[in-house]
Amino acid sequence: MSTANGPTDRMNALEAARRGGAPGFAPDGLGPLLTRVLGSHTVSLGEPILEADVAPAVITQVRFENLRTIKSLTLDLEGLTVLIGENGTGKSTILEGIELLRKAANPSFVDEFFQVHGGFPSLLRSGESELKLGVTVRDGSNTLSWDATLIRLASGGLLISREVMQGVEDGKRRPTSGYESRSSSANRLKLGQLGERDSAAPLLDCLRRIQVYTAFETAPSWAGQELKRPSPLRETHVFQPAERLARHGANIANAYHALKNEFGKEHWDETMELVRLGLGDDVSDLGVRADPGGGNVALTMWYRGQSEAVPVFSMSDGTLAYLGFVALFRLDSRAALIGFDEPENHLHPKLLMRVLSFFETLAKNRPVLLATHQDRLLDGLEDPASAARLLSLNAARELEVHRPDRGALDTWLEKYRGLGDVRAAGYEASVFKPDPKGS
Ligand SMILES: Nc1ncnc2c1ncn2[C@@H]1O[C@H](COP(=O)(O)OP(=O)(O)OP(=O)(O)O)[C@@H](O)[C@H]1O
Ligand SMILES: [Mg+2]
């Protein structure tokens, strides 16, 4: 139950701090976390662990050609990028393309291309025969780029007709860190065969540290039983170490076990503070309960005044999703790029704002790419002019990307509370202008 100094007030205070207002506003009973937040007038919400260990190389650009609605797209990534657009424009496709780039760093790429992603019938833009993937990584003053052309053979098989790795140092090409192969028979990427000590290793390492999440699936346990496909978040899991929240939140119990036991009391207290910010002051603890039948563990939540913990299978959808985001935020330190499709699923708008703060903090150390349907999320952006991308389809059903015009947006924001509000009122065409890199 929320009290006068409960989570609602805290959230309001955070919102005020975020917008630069309410200096000196310091509700009672807040932990050092919030004091720090209000003191600095930024919504930093603590730091994910091990930030100092983040490798310097970062992904700065991804490129796709002939991927479903994408004819040709060059997407620069820095800080937070939020894709918004109508159903079927290609938001999830961009995230899937990024997941393909992650897999390109593994020797099993071609198998997964077909078995997990459906191969050319699922991915290749209709009427086309060549799918192109590319990525650029910045490593200090060096840049490394990798591009590959995948051709669909008449047999349905795959040919890697061209694969190029290019190193650029201080604007000059570095042949030592690259290769270029053209082939009429290659059916494996060279990239996944490179060794750790290859000069292109920073690019490989960055790709392996990509994390793409799809919306947390929290279907109630009874629905999962009927479908014979329980939500990964609600299942019990074999007890094992967790370095990060796995895709679909499939290791949430292990993630909280790690958070509670591996990083010290102060870190755990901050994690619980974030949990209470979203879920209320009456959350007293989170636990990881061992399944009596064996080595499996499941998440449980304690509320003050209740004698029994709420097991993960009876938590609300939004509660569970929010716990997933807290775990993702607090454990995720090594990611070179984080993608999340539809983070708004199950979340009350206020919780969505909390989750947006997590992503904005994560985006200080690596690019974060969100895909959403929620104008409300655009309203909460710290810098909507740099973060938002509007996706649409042209008459040929090709993806087109639009970016806000900063000057136009500033004018509209005199009357509207945020970019999402402007868009919801039907004025998106006055604010978003075509991005020549996304056609
Ligand atoms: N082979 C293909 N060639 C061209 N377009 C395709 C092909 N296969 C699927 N598509 C289109 O690609 C789009 C895929 O949409 P995607 O899932 O990326 O959209 P989205 O923006 O995430 O939509 P939503 O908001 O509904 O989640 C659909 O519009 C689909 O019709
Ligand atoms: Mg989608």
Image (cartoon, rainbow, N blue to C red):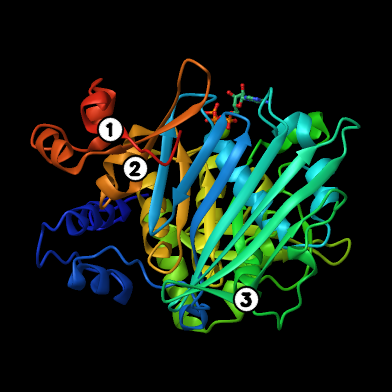
Query: Is ligand 1 less than 8 Å from the beta carbon at label 2?
Result: no
Which residue corresponds to the image point at 57% horizontal and 57% vertical from the top-left?
135
Which residue corresponds to the image point at 28% horizontal and 33% vertical from the top-left?
433
Which amino acid lies under the numbered mark 1 shown in the image of this protein? Phe
Q: Which residue is mark 3?
A: 177
For the residue labelled by badge 2, is the local secondary structure a helix, a strand or a loop?
strand
Asked where in the image residue 132 lies, by quadrant, the reply is: top right
Dots 3, 1 in contact, CB < 8 A: no
Q: CA distance from mark 2 to mark 1?
A: 9 Å
Closest to the observer: 116 or 20? 116
Dots 2, 1 in contact, CB < 8 A: yes
Q: Which residue is mark 2?
A: 388
The x and y percentages for residue 225 are: 80, 34
The x and y percentages for residue 112 are: 81, 49
Q: Quadrant of ligand 2?
A: top right
Q: Which residue is mark 1?
A: 432
Asked where in the image residue 367 lies, by quadrant, the reply is: bottom left
In the image, residue 257 sits, relative to residue 352, either above or below, namely: below
Q: Answer left or right for 437 relative to 136.
A: left
Q: Residues within 10 Å of mark 1 (few under 14, many from 20)?
A: many
